[in-house]
Amino acid sequence: MADASILRTFPNPAPGRGYVIEHTHHEFTSVCPVTGHPDFGTITVRYVAGAKCVELKSLKLYFHAFRNEGIYFEAVTNKICDDLGAALRPRRLTVVSSWRGRGGITSVVTADWKPGRGARA
Amino acid sequence: MADASILRTFPNPAPGRGYVIEHTHHEFTSVCPVTGHPDFGTITVRYVAGAKCVELKSLKLYFHAFRNEGIYFEAVTNKICDDLGAALRPRRLTVVSSWRGRGGITSVVTADWKPGRGARA
Amino acid sequence: MADASILRTFPNPAPGRGYVIEHTHHEFTSVCPVTGHPDFGTITVRYVAGAKCVELKSLKLYFHAFRNEGIYFEAVTNKICDDLGAALRPRRLTVVSSWRGRGGITSVVTADWKPGRGARA
Amino acid sequence: MADASILRTFPNPAPGRGYVIEHTHHEFTSVCPVTGHPDFGTITVRYVAGAKCVELKSLKLYFHAFRNEGIYFEAVTNKICDDLGAALRPRRLTVVSSWRGRGGITSVVTADWKPGRGARA
Amino acid sequence: MADASILRTFPNPAPGRGYVIEHTHHEFTSVCPVTGHPDFGTITVRYVAGAKCVELKSLKLYFHAFRNEGIYFEAVTNKICDDLGAALRPRRLTVVSSWRGRGGITSVVTADWKPGRGARA
Amino acid sequence: MADASILRTFPNPAPGRGYVIEHTHHEFTSVCPVTGHPDFGTITVRYVAGAKCVELKSLKLYFHAFRNEGIYFEAVTNKICDDLGAALRPRRLTVVSSWRGRGGITSVVTADWKPGRGARA
Amino acid sequence: MADASILRTFPNPAPGRGYVIEHTHHEFTSVCPVTGHPDFGTITVRYVAGAKCVELKSLKLYFHAFRNEGIYFEAVTNKICDDLGAALRPRRLTVVSSWRGRGGITSVVTADWKPGRGARA
Amino acid sequence: MADASILRTFPNPAPGRGYVIEHTHHEFTSVCPVTGHPDFGTITVRYVAGAKCVELKSLKLYFHAFRNEGIYFEAVTNKICDDLGAALRPRRLTVVSSWRGRGGITSVVTADWKPGRGARA
Amino acid sequence: MADASILRTFPNPAPGRGYVIEHTHHEFTSVCPVTGHPDFGTITVRYVAGAKCVELKSLKLYFHAFRNEGIYFEAVTNKICDDLGAALRPRRLTVVSSWRGRGGITSVVTADWKPGRGARA
Amino acid sequence: MADASILRTFPNPAPGRGYVIEHTHHEFTSVCPVTGHPDFGTITVRYVAGAKCVELKSLKLYFHAFRNEGIYFEAVTNKICDDLGAALRPRRLTVVSSWRGRGGITSVVTADWKPGRGARA
């Protein structure tokens, strides 16, 4: 499974300004846990940094680690949200996953991270 | 008629987070109840899950079941909204149907589901 | 002149739900009252029904009836708004007309209907 | 210099309704006051009429009158805003100018007119 | 390093109106401080002028001065925001940088300038 | 099965000129003979008429008749080509079917009709 | 019926060069001779002039004259081809009509004019 | 390595007609043999069948089998061409691979198969 | 009138290779000789150089010189073709002018230059 | 100056098949030799390999080496054509450079390489 420990951070160069950073990975792929068929999508990470920013190359490798994992759309979105929330402790964080269709259906899942609130409460 | 009992659900993997799930079916087709001509459209289902998420394959089969039904744009949108509301008991639910034109007119119908409020009151 | 009596209605199938219905006619044409040259545009009607919905074929014929009428952009938009407001008594109604350019100028006119408020007060 | 007296008006056909009128001129051209090179842009005028609407042909001729004037992006936008505000005394008025780039830079200037408030106060 | 002293200003021609000026540079390029590979992006500067507007040619030369500098996406965005804020003392200022992807990831950084508030507090 | 006898013709109004007629049906749907899932596509018919042209409404009804038939992409394209060739005896005829993807694969099949040459020789 | 005598010509300014002139009318409308419903399309006229060029304003008025005529796609294309061929005696002429769809079918008709060869031979 | 024996065929339903079949897989992914990073592309297979057509589901599984293989753009294109040529013995076959860029470079490789001519002669 | 003597040339850097040079001016404007209204278009110049290439800044100034000239689409295209042919003596030259529409008609004029053959023969 | 010795090659994996390889660099930048301003463009290299293929990373570094060189559009296109022709000795080679506009003019230069024929003969 993609391991959150892959993620690297660097100090926020403008901690006094609540600016927004957005990274979009256009080549995300994982595997359907039921059929074993590949899924393809786009993942957008949008956050206001606290003390730390995520380092881009480590983010890419973290995304690559899902390549052969069987995981649902809803679960992968929440896992990325949890992992980045824990690694960055941002002021605000939103994760959007957008999936190419199967059988004529496309999907989008959007999750927000908030400090001190778990996804599975 | 498309039977709501086709819909299958699975437990929401992140019930503590009010995240948004959106599925868009690009190949919806039904039949005009007056002329018998086929109608073609796109159906978007956008919801914040409560305890349950809709399973995608069952959603697709539910949509396919409208293929030879004669039903108006307004009625099909409200029926999908009622059926998914009853099956999922979501925190929020919106259904949008968007129809290819006939005679130069395209149409969009947008309905929200709210707990404890019927469409035909 | 296009006669509002062409418009036909049917009972709202979900009167208990304040959902939005939008019809867009992509082939509207009338005539410039000054030059006699044809005008071409798109008319969007967006409303929340009260007891009645507009029947699509009658809406199309109503729009066709403007074909050889000389009428300004501002006036045609307000007339459609008045006619549909009177025929449907909707909870909310917006009419948007969007016109192909002449002499390098394109135009958009947007009018809202409100119960009990005439356009010419 | 483009003369506001070119602008002609006609009575608002629906004074009791606060509807929005928008005209976009796609072929605006003036001259850079520093280099003498031509500038090309799009001008959008969006307003809620009071008693008067602007007549389209006069608006076109008013825009044409800038063809060989040397004037900055910021100044031309404010002048159009002032001239139309004075001619129409609208309830609301916004002017947006959008300019093709020079040296890889495109520009957009957006100004609102408010009754009783000059641009140069 | 790009020197803020390159920036030239001229007096705001409409100081009494809080209008919005937006310049987008489509050909920004700098160098990745880690790999030395070139980065390419678009920089948008959107502001409400106080007493001064930025002169376009000087803005272009200021952007060109980053061509061979090694600097991170987050840092360059904040530097441009600081430099323009100091030079213009605007009423409002937003800087958006949008970057072509490397390894399948595109990025957008958005920073607001506020009077009397440093980015590194 | 869609019956070629649905097709109606009318006399070519310009038999002395070898001009090209092209009709594209954007709402073709049939059923996969293996899985029973619906297929959606676009059918283009391009021909140089001999003595007869195909009447449009009958062409539409002929296409509608495939709605619930189980038939492969390759077979339906050749059947349409054979049926129109037999009904029109055109100077030239090409049929192109273009199919929305399943499992990430889209398909296009292109067949030409020639007098006196069967498809299954 | 649209009368070819509306067409005006002017002398070809470069008779020694076989250059190509193309005019596309984006707002053609006529009426379906069977249903009486309006048809909308685009007409492209592409020719190599002999001694004469067609004057644009007269071409526009000629096209406008079809507004309330009941005529088939195939017939109107051939009539325009015949009328322009007779009026211009060009070296080469092609007329292409492209029609917005009815019932999900769009159409394109393409005809060439050749000196000394009638369409109805 | 992707095994050509995955490919299944079915008899050409119209062997007497030299029609063209084209399948495009939009979700091809393999791995760069040097860096280990994933590559993403689109594969188009266009052929005129002899006695056999390729079965679509087997073609999809054949493409999926490249998912974790390290292979160059040029090599994968030629291997697909060789494998399909051997399996189908078509009259004509072209394979086009189109690759998302790395480091700002996108690539397209196009190979034709001809009976009796090996790629490595 | 735009004066061909504005055009400057420089020696072809690769006279031994028949390569193609294409310049497209997106901001051409002249004036209608009949109505005095401005015309806007795009001019493409495509040529295989002989001994000389056209210098870009002089080409831009040459195009700017048409700004207030009254001239027909057909005439301006042939004049540019003649002027560039005379100035460059190219191996091949094509000029394409493409015009924004007036009254719903857009136009394209395409002229080729050939050594030793005048346009007005 | 960009040094052709940066280019690396690898053996053509399918020398018996005359297939086409195309690489497009979307982030080319050099400097105008007259004004010193940066130029931005896209370079496409399309070739049929002989014994050797160009290695992609070396091609990228070769393009990067033009970053601060002052060189004309025509000259850079011919230099790339000469350098790749010498390094690869391909069966066929075409280089296309496409440049973002300055002063409203965009440019495209297309050169072919042929064995045994220099560009400056």
Image (cartoon, coloured by chain):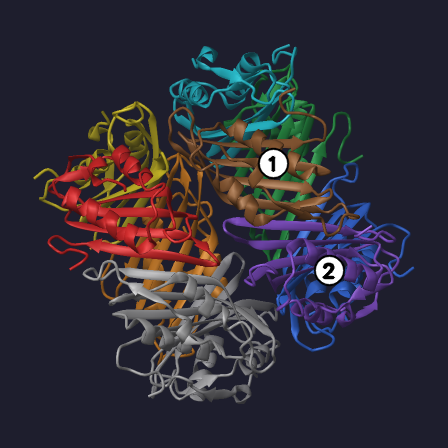
Chain colours: A blue, B purple, C brown, D cyan, E green, G red, I yellow, J orange
**Which label belongs to residue J82?**
none
State the residue in front, G111 or C8.
C8
Residue under the image location 66 percent in, 67 percent down: B66
On the rendered structure, is G112 left or right of E52? left
State the residue in front, J36 or B83.
B83
Element on which disc 2 rests: helix
Query: What's the chain of the residue with tag 1?
Result: C
Q: Amino acid at mark 2?
A: Ile
The residue that label 2 is drawn on is B80
On the rendered structure, is A77 left or right of C9? right
- Quadrant containing the C terminus of chain E is top right
State the residue in front, E45 or C77.
C77
Q: Position of residue J100 (x, y in %)?
A: 42, 43
Query: What's the chain of the residue with tag 2?
Result: B
Cα distance in 3D space between marks 1 and 2: 27 Å
Q: Position of residue I3 (x, y in %)?
A: 21, 27
The residue that label 1 is drawn on is C95
